[in-house]
């Protein structure tokens, strides 16, 4: 398969048992080893980790045990010809973090969160990656009055500064999301993530991860979010997927809802040589109806859709586009794009 220099990744959570808030798992859990086998089979190159995907039971291990397990994981990856793209602290499942982690109203919780972030950095180092991703899942509120948004922003900055100082080589990418699990999240968009990045003590080591579904939930266009981040060199990873309107976070296969929106994400990534700076992460989930034995097709489809859209984008005659723009004939431009997406060259 021609991959045009792109590298692809996903996380173990993208092979999923199908539980939702209204029903239990419908597919048996697969062990990590069998998930690892899927990566190469489907053309993926790198693995995304939560800290406890790499080191299960992280809260109960000594620092030495933790590091040793992370080293063993690096070897397991190498055995499969894989490497780690990033590690993200899972700060949303522990009972301590019910009301948030870095922005919890409880000082003990905040210090747990900082410790856990340091462990994530230690694990990243052992896995051989310098990238830490922060999805700020529970940093927000159900009741506006329950926290102080200004103080929360400062707390997030303090946490980022602590992490940047703890390891001088680590880079941090914030993954913004406007809601879910919280009603309202504190860093809802790429713009918020970048504004925070520039206020840290080491702005050069701060960037963002753009997830398509999160941008759509915020009412924003994912390709414009990508472009905004790239304009300051801060797009360090992506979670491409799709989302059918402002409802629960769907993580649908890339391009499966709106292929033109997917095309525009591919187009800006490809026109700006994203393959030189980052990996194409696909944060997608199989729909709950998919039987277990065939529940990896969402990953296959997303990767192939991305590559098909690269081919389409490169096949469109840019001179034609420029001429239509010069004539301000945007209806003809529309027709050109639609025809290309429908497999015709008008
Ligand atoms: C949820 C997020 C989540 C993160 C992952 C890595 O909405 O997209 O899947 O990407 O936990 O931090
Ligand atoms: Mg994501």
Image (cartoon, grey):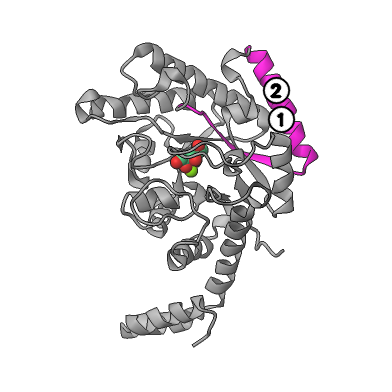
313 up-or-down from 15: above or below: below
Question: Which residue is located at x 38 percent, y 46 percent?
Answer: 248
Can you give x and y, in whole percent of width and height, for residue 289 in the image? 55, 51
Disc 2: which residue? 69
Image: magenta residue range: 62-91
Query: Is 221 situated above or below 17?
Result: below
- Crowd around label 1: few <14 · some 14–19 · many ≥20 (10 Å): many
| Quarter that holds the N terminus | bottom right
- Percent position (x, y) of residue 195? 33, 40
Q: Residue at x 50, y 24 (%)?
A: 117
Residue furthest to the bottom in view is 346
Q: Nearer the viewer, residue 206 or 64?
A: 64
Residue 97 occupies which quadrant of the picture?
top left
Mark 1 within 8 Å of ligand 1, using the beta carbon: no
Disc 2 secondary structure class: helix
* Residue at figure coordinates x 57%, y 39% from the top left: 13
Q: Is mark 2 within 8 Å of ligand 1?
A: no
| Up-down relation of residue 320 to residue 144 (above or below) | below
Specify whether 158 is left or right of 14: left
Real-space Cα separation, disc 2 to disc 1, in angstroms: 6 Å
Question: Does residue 239 appear to the left or right of 335 in the view shown?
Answer: right
Q: Give the number of the disc on residue 289.
A: none
Secondary structure state at the residue bearing disc 1:
helix
For disc 1, the marked residue is 73
From this viewpoint, which residue is outermost toward the left? 145
Please report the residue visible at 30 percent of the width from the left and 29 percent of the height from the top: 153
Rendering coords of residue 71 (x, y %): 72, 26
Residue 341 drawn in magenta: no
Mark 2 and mark 1 residues within 8 Å of each other at the beta carbon: yes
Mark 2 Cα within 10 Å, few/some/many (few <14, many 20+)?
some
């Amino acid at each position: 398969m021609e991959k045009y220099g792109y590298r692809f990744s996903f996380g173990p959570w993208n092979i999923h048992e199908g539980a939702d808030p209204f029903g239990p798992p419908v597919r048996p859990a697969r062990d990590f080893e069998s998930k690892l086998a899927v990566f190469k089979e489907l053309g993926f190159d790198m693995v995304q980790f939560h800290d406890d995907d790499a080191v299960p039971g992280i809260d109960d291990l000594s620092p030495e045990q933790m590091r040793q397990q992370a080293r063993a994981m690096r070897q397991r990856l190498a055995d499969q010809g894989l490497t780690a793209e990033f590690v993200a602290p899972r700060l949303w499942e522990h009972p301590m973090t019910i009301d948030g982690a870095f922005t919890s109203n409880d000082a003990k919780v905040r210090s747990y969160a900082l410790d856990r972030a340091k462990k994530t950095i230690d694990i990243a180092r052992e896995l051989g990656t310098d990238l830490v991703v922060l999805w700020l899942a529970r940093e927000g509120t159900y009741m506006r009055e329950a926290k102080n948004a200004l103080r929360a922003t400062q707390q997030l900055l303090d946490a980022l500064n602590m992490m940047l100082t703890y390891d001088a080589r680590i880079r941090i990418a914030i993954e913004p999301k406007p809601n879910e699990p919280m009603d309202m999240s504190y860093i809802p968009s790429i713009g918020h993530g970048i504004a925070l990045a520039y206020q840290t003590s080491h702005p050069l080591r701060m960037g963002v991860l753009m997830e398509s579904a999160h941008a759509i939930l915020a009412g924003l266009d994912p390709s414009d979010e990508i472009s905004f981040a790239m304009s300051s060199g801060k797009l360090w990873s992506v979670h491409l997927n799709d989302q059918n309107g402002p409802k629960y976070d769907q993580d649908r296969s890339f391009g499966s809802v709106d292929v033109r929106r997917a095309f525009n994400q591919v187009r800006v990534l490809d026109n700006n040589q994203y393959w030189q700076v980052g990996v194409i992460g696909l944060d997608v989930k199989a729909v709950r109806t998919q039987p277990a034995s065939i529940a990896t097709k969402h990953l296959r489809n997303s990767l192939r859709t991305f590559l098909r859209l690269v081919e389409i984008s490169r096949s469109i005659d840019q001179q034609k586009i420029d001429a239509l723009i010069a004539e301000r004939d945007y209806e003809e431009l529309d027709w050109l794009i639609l025809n290309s997406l429908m497999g015709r060259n008008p």
